[in-house]
Image: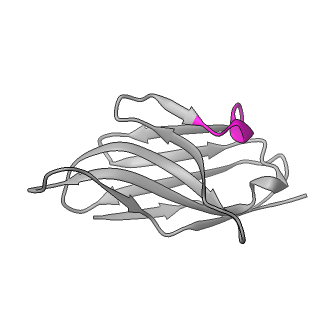
Amino acid sequence: VQLQASGGGLVQAGGSLRLSCVASGSIHSINAMAWFRQVPGKQRELVAAITSGGDTNYADSVKGRFTISRDYAENTVNLQMDSLKPEDTAVYYCNANIQELRRYGTMAYWGKGTQVTVSS
């Protein structure tokens, strides 16, 4: 199983970016999917999460600006980031709890990070 993220880049404050992450491989089912971010010297923090039922959860710092969504048919999770601020600058990682084919239980998988830089 692999998670492949895309969509990072450089944007001015107030701008928008859209991150996407697609899960591929021997997947039976995917439970929650999420985006985390990390800046050097700090712990990785949850940005937004979405359950298999579509319930969402956001960090207080991004509520009202970021929107997480899923394409269940394509095993994809997206993060629409609007009104970006310099403090949103970080490496963003996608995460998914996945049950593989012919295996019991779920495992957490991480994609390689994608850099988001917001200039002031």
Above or below: residue 55 compared with residue 10: above
- Residue 72 in the image, given as x and y percentages of width and height: 33, 40
> Is residue 67 toward the left or the right of residue 111 in the image?
right
Above or below: residue 20 compared with residue 43: above
What residue is shown at x 50% (from left), y 41% (from top)?
A: 49
Asked if residue 61 is among those painted magenta in the image, a careful observer would answer: yes
Marks counted in the figure total: 0
Q: Going by the picture, which residue comes out furthest to the right? A: 120
What residue is shown at x 61% (from left), y 43% (from top)?
A: 80
- Residue 109 in the image, given as x and y percentages of width and height: 37, 60
Quarter of the image that includes the N terminus:
bottom left
Asked if residue 110 is among those painted magenta in the image, a careful observer would answer: no
> Is residue 25 toward the left or the right of residue 66 in the image?
left
Quarter of the image that includes the C terminus:
bottom right
- Residue 117 in the image, given as x and y percentages of width and height: 75, 63
Which stretch is magenta? 58-65
What residue is shown at x 55% (from left), y 34% (from top)?
A: 57
- Residue 11 in the image, given as x and y percentages of width and height: 78, 59
What residue is shown at x 53% (from left), y 60% (from top)?
A: 93
Closer to the camera in the image, 88 or 108: 108
Above or below: residue 119 compared with residue 98: below
Instruction: Determine which quarter of the picture holds residue 55.
Output: top left
Above or below: residue 55 compared with residue 28: above
> Is residue 74 toward the left or the right of residue 39 in the image?
left
Look at the image and name its color scheme. Answer: one colour
Instruction: Determine which quarter of the picture holds residue 62.
Output: top right
